[in-house]
Image (cartoon, grey):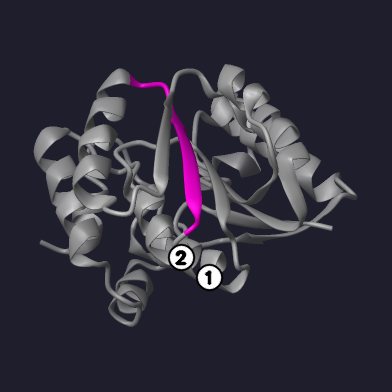
């Protein structure tokens, strides 16, 4: 089965393709493959859930791994765990003393992520926090080298405001789904309006520099000055 067909099961609604499908398939073929552990996690998630299109996928996953490595990140915050795909990808790139704190509110996703981390996170780098990220993030202590944001879209501006204060100078924040299938161009619903407002707020924030990459569903890489 083609990889992207696993990532995006049909929910009886159109999927807007931001970039050319054939080019994405070519890019996947030319990108470092997932580890066997990550592939097992994908298969496990696919067998237990109707839809796994919230998995980041290998293009985003390998970019996260690369950014973790080249930034020498040791402490990572992830907001939105789902079943643990992106956390495991980043954990594979961390040094021995590195850690990821990942937050998930959905009870089923918590259970699946816990099972996956127990099986695949053999070095115990990943720490799952269960609950509402809006509440939990305010209680986190210390600085982070990298933040990955892939949670409820309406709350992106709140998460940015909270996590940018906890991001070290020179640290990176990666934000997924910022184009929302192109809906941010002419927002007609709460999520697309919230994402458009988030994108504009980041673009106007003098504390950061950023690049919005128009591939998959849009990905913004932010660096704190």
Residue tagged 2: 65
Report if residue 189 is visible in the image: no
Mark drawn on residue 197: none
Residue at 54% across, 24% down? 133
Q: How many marks?
A: 2
- Taken as a whole, is the magenta stretch helix, strand or loop? strand
Density class for disc 1 (Cα within 10 Å; few <14, some 14-19, many ≥20) is some
**Front in this rendered view, residue 221 or 99:** 99
Q: Looking at the rendering, which quadrant does residue 26 occupy? A: bottom left
Report the disc number at residue 69: 1
Viewport quadrant of the N terminus? bottom left
Q: Position of residue 171 (x, y in %)?
A: 71, 57
| Highlighted range, magenta | 97-106
Rendered image quadrant of residue 4: bottom left
Identify the secondary structure beneath mark 2: helix
Apparent side of residue 203 relative to residue 31 in the rendered image (left or right) = right
Badge 1 element: helix
């Amino acid at each position: 089965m083609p990889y992207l067909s696993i990532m995006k099961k049909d929910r009886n609604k159109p999927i807007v393709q931001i970039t050319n499908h054939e080019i994405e398939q070519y890019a996947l073929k030319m990108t470092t493959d997932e580890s066997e552990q990550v592939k097992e996690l994908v298969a496990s998630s696919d067998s237990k859930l109707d839809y796994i299109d919230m998995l980041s996928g290998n293009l985003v996953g390998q970019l996260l791994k690369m950014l973790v490595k080249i930034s020498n990140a040791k402490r990572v915050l992830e907001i939105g765990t789902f079943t643990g795909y992106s956390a495991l990808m980043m954990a594979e790139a961390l040094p021995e003393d590195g850690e990821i704190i990942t937050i998930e509110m959905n009870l089923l996703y918590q259970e699946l992520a816990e099972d996956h981390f127990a099986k695949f996170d053999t070095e115990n780098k990943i720490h799952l926090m269960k609950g509402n990220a809006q509440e939990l993030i305010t209680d986190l202590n210390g600085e982070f080298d990298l933040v990955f944001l892939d949670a409820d879209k309406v709350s992106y501006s709140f998460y940015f405001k909270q996590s940018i204060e906890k991001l070290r100078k020179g640290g990176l924040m990666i934000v997924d789904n910022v184009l929302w299938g192109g809906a941010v161009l002419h927002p007609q619903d709460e999520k697309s309006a919230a994402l458009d407002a988030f994108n504009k707020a980041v673009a106007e924030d003098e504390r950061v520099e950023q690049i919005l990459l128009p591939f998959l569903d849009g990905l913004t890489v932010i660096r704190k000055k």
